[in-house]
Amino acid sequence: MSAGPSQWTDTDLAALARAGREDACRELLNRHKAGVYRLIVRQTGDAEEAMDLTQEAFVAGFAAIDRYDGERPFRIWISRIAINKCRDWARRRKVRAFFTRALPIEAAHDVASGTPLPDSEAGDRFELVRVRAAIADLPRNLREVLLLRGVEEMSQAETAALLDVSEKTVETRLYRARAKLRQLLAGSGGGG
């Protein structure tokens, strides 16, 4: 291969990464890190955590590069790893939240949130916060489909492959996610 890594396909790069070529790993990372980061930040709602989870996803991906089959796009494969990292993060977060709530009431001032209250937000910013909160309240399976199809603009086939479900399931979940989102937004009193 006389061309440089930027000219190679993802499948070629994965094969070279499997053989230990660091330049191939770097090129795969450069090609896909922005998309993986966007996916994770939308799943978690936390830009700082998303940076860490993006790194974790690529470390896990390169550690498991032997399992990449080349039959599906690398983007889908690494995105699936990223989704799993988000799920793990959410489970850990729930455990931490439980223990935080379990603190004695006199310690509550130590865990108070430093984020502004929703009523301190104005106009479009308030609406964005409201929509993000409603999306976060969706069940995970609906939220994932909504974000992958609507925000990441993945095709129905790509979303189905990433989540390991049928395209019909993606279609059904997207319909339900949109309906539930409308319901949540209507119920949260956006008519101010």
Image: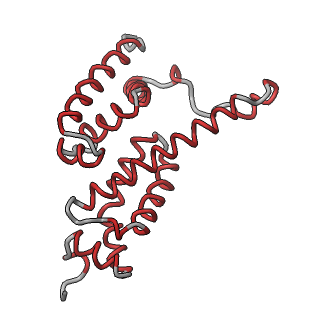
Residue at (40%, 68%) from the top-left corner? 62
- Relative placement, left or right, of 96 versus 55 is right
132 up-or-down from 93: above or below: above
Residue at (32%, 54%) from the top-left corner? 35
Residue 149, position as x, y percentages in the image: 24, 39
Residue 158, position as x, y percentages in the image: 21, 48
Q: Quadrant of the C terminus?
A: top left
Residue at (27%, 20%) from the top-left corner? 179
Residue 33, position as x, y percentages in the image: 36, 60
47 up-or-down from 66: above or below: above
- Looking at the rendering, which quadrant does residue 139 occupy? top left
- Relative placement, left or right, of 98 versus 54 is right
Residue found farthest to the bottom: 2
Residue 107, position as x, y percentages in the image: 79, 30
Which one is in front, 169 or 11?
169
Q: Quadrant of the N terminus?
A: bottom left
Which one is in front, 169 or 34?
169
